[in-house]
Image (spheres, rainbow, N blue to C red):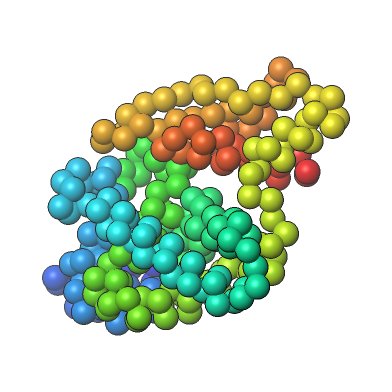
Amino acid sequence: MHDLVKLIRKNIFSKKKSSSKQQVEYVLGLKLNNAPLFTRALSHSSSNNNPIENNERLEYLGDAVLGAVIADYLFKRYPYKHEGFLTEMRSKMVNRQTLNAIAIKMGLNNITFFNKHDNAIKNSQIFGNTLEAIVGAVYLDKGYEKTKKWVLNQIVIPYLFVEDLELVEINLKNKLIGWANKNNHQLSFETIDEKYDRGRRVFTVAIVLNGAPVTEGRGYNKKEASQAAAAAAIEKLGI
C-alpha cells in the first residue's frame, strides 16, 4: 500500500500513465467516470488558486451532500430519538477534526495537492476539506443514490463507530475548561498567529495552563483552531 500511494503522488491522473486512474480508484474504492473532476477535488487552493480548478467549490457541494447523507442515516438508525440528539450526532460525525482523521486514514493526505512547504496548511484540516470535495465529486460523477452508498461503505461503516460517538463530548473546549476549573488550574486560549493563505485566514491558538503553553491548534477560524488545540491538550494531559 505504501508503494502504491507513492506512485499515486507521482503519477496521479498522468496522461502518460494510464494505470494511475485505476490506482486512485483503488484508494477511493470507486470506479471513476470523470477523472479530471477528481483531480480538481484533490487540488487545494494553495496548489492552484483558480476557483475553477481547485477544490473549494466541490468542498462546498460535498459538505451539503455529506450532511444530507448523514442526516438520513441517523434519522433511520434512531427512529425514536429527538431532534437535538440527531443534530448533535451529525455534528460529531461531520466535524472538521473527525473528517480530517478519516481522510488521513483513507490516505487522502498522500494524494492531495497542496503547498507542502507551508506547515500551517499541513497542520490544518485541509484533508477533511478534501474529503468533502471528494464527496462532491462523487455526487457529480455518480448521482445521489450511489454517493449515499459510497459514503456509507467507505466512510461511515469503516470509520464512524456510532455507538462510541454517542459517548463522545462534542465540545472539547468546554470539557477542558471544566477540568481546569474543577482542579483549580488557570487556563486560557490565546490566538498566537493569524495569517493569510491564498486569501483565507489561518489561525493558530495556543492553550496556556498555569502560565505555561501546553498545545497549539490550527484552523480556518478561531473556533476550529481552539477545538483542535483542546483535543491535543486533552490527549497530552490524559484527561
Choose top left, top right, bottom left or bottom right for residue 163: bottom right
Q: Is residue 70 left or right of residue 131?
A: right
Would residue 60 appear left or right of 194 to someone viewing this image?
left
Q: Within the image, what quadrant is residue 117 found in?
A: top left
Q: Residue at x 50, y 40 (%)?
A: 224
Q: How many marks on residues?
A: 0
The residue shown at (66%, 23%) is 188
Front-lying residue, 118 or 199: 199
Say if 122 sits above or below 160 in the image: above
Residue 3 lies, in percent from the top left, at 41, 70
Q: Position of residue 123 (x, y in %)?
A: 47, 42
State the residue at coordinates (27%, 42%). Answer: 46
| Residue 105 showing in the rendered view | yes
Q: Is residue 21 visible?
A: no
User: Is residue 40 or residue 76 the one in the foreground?
Assistant: 76
State the image coordinates of residue 81 (x, y, percent, origin top left). Answer: 65, 68
Residue farthest toward the top in the current orientation of the protein: 211
Q: Quadrant of the C terminus?
A: top right
| Residue at position x 84%, y 32% in the image | 182
Extreme residue in the right direction:
183
Q: Is residue 230 above or below residue 55?
A: above
Asked if residue 153 lies left or right of residue 10, the reply is right
Q: Nearer the viewer, residue 7 or 37?
A: 37
Q: Position of residue 13 (x, y in %)?
A: 21, 69
